[in-house]
């Protein structure tokens, strides 16, 4: 409800999303697809980038809210209440993510379709793409919450978020598929959650097969579990610091 009422933010995100797609459409149509460095056609490449930007822009900045909760004392105020702080933060972020994915998904689909004019993939590939888009957003929230917990030690989350964001762009295959990268970079990337959040997930619409879906499912379960366990562990460590310092 809060996300829907904040329609001005959704309008701003939609404008930003369309601006990115316009730039990428002209840039990679000339540079990447024309020179043949990727196997995708210009139309497929724009859809690939659109699916990446759709999820990336939809993930809320949960880490900033958690930083503010720690700095202004909101966390200490909420701890005595019979509700999980992590659970409430996650629920709020998941609600915002859901609204963003729906609204920005419609904007992404209509805008990209108008730009390209065709669907360069089978429509059945959209179903797992939408599902794994939501899963990727949830995993993105979990790792952003991990970044938010760094405020217990650093009191500011910006350094970790900058590192996370740049690695996500590079190892996630934001603008170009990982297949054009050197093999050693591809190997490193597949040992991180970044391809799951962006490129590997977006490519499922353009290269739909059951093996790809199985790989994404296993990766989602693995990284979701790792993220949740890490979140609980660091949260308990952070609370000890909070209690030692007197709240």
Image: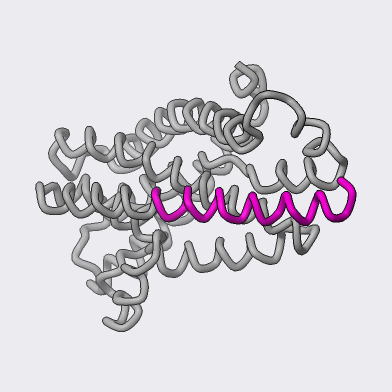
Q: Residue at x 48, y 63 (%)?
A: 169
Residue 22 placement (x, y as % from top left): 46, 49
Horizontal side of residue 60 vs 217, given as left or right: right
Instruction: Indicate whether 174 appears above or below 202.
Output: below
Residue 178 placement (x, y as % from top left): 30, 68
| Foreground of the two, 132 or 224 | 224
Residue 120 placement (x, y as % from top left): 18, 45
Q: Is the C terminus in the top left, top right, bottom left or bottom right quadrant?
A: top right
Instruction: Indicate whether 93 appears above or below 243.
Output: above
Q: Residue at x 67, y 53 (%)?
A: 149
Q: How is the image coloured?
A: one colour
| Foreground of the two, 111 or 246 | 246
Overall secondary structure of the magenta section: helix
User: How many discs mark residues in the rendered view?
Assistant: 0
Question: What stretch of residues is rendered in magenta?
Answer: 225-247
| Magenta span contains residue 182 | no
Q: Residue at x 82, y 38 (%)?
A: 76
| Magenta span contains residue 243 | yes
| Foreground of the two, 87 or 34 | 87
Q: Residue at x 25, y 70 (%)?
A: 179
Residue 131 placement (x, y as % from top left): 30, 35
Q: Is the N terminus in the top left, top right, bottom left or bottom right quadrant?
A: top right
């Amino acid at each position: 409800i809060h996300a829907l009422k904040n329609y001005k933010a959704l309008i701003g995100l939609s404008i930003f999303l369309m601006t990115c797609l316009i730039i990428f459409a002209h840039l990679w149509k000339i540079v990447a697809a024309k020179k043949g460095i990727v196997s995708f056609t210009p139309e497929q490449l724009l859809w690939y980038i659109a699916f990446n930007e759709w999820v990336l822009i939809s993930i809320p900045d949960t880490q900033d809210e958690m930083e503010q909760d720690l700095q202004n004392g909101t966390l200490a105020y909420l701890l005595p209440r019979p509700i999980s702080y992590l659970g409430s933060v996650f629920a709020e972020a998941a609600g915002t993510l859901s609204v963003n994915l729906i609204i920005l998904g419609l904007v992404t689909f209509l805008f990209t379709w108008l730009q390209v004019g065709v669907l360069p993939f089978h429509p059945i590939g959209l179903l797992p793409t939408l599902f794994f888009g939501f899963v990727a957003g949830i995993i993105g929230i979990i790792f952003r919450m991990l970044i938010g917990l760094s405020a217990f030690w650093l009191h500011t989350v910006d350094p970790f978020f900058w590192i996370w964001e740049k690695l996500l762009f590079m190892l996630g295959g934001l603008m170009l598929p990982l297949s054009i990268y050197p093999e050693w970079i591809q190997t490193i990337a597949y040992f991180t959650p970044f391809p799951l959040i962006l490129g590997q997930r977006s490519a499922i619409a353009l290269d739909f097969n059951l093996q790809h879906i199985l790989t994404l499912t296993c990766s989602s379960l693995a990284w979701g579990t790792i993220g949740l366990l890490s979140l609980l562990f660091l949260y308990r460590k952070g609370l000890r610091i909070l209690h030692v310092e007197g709240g």
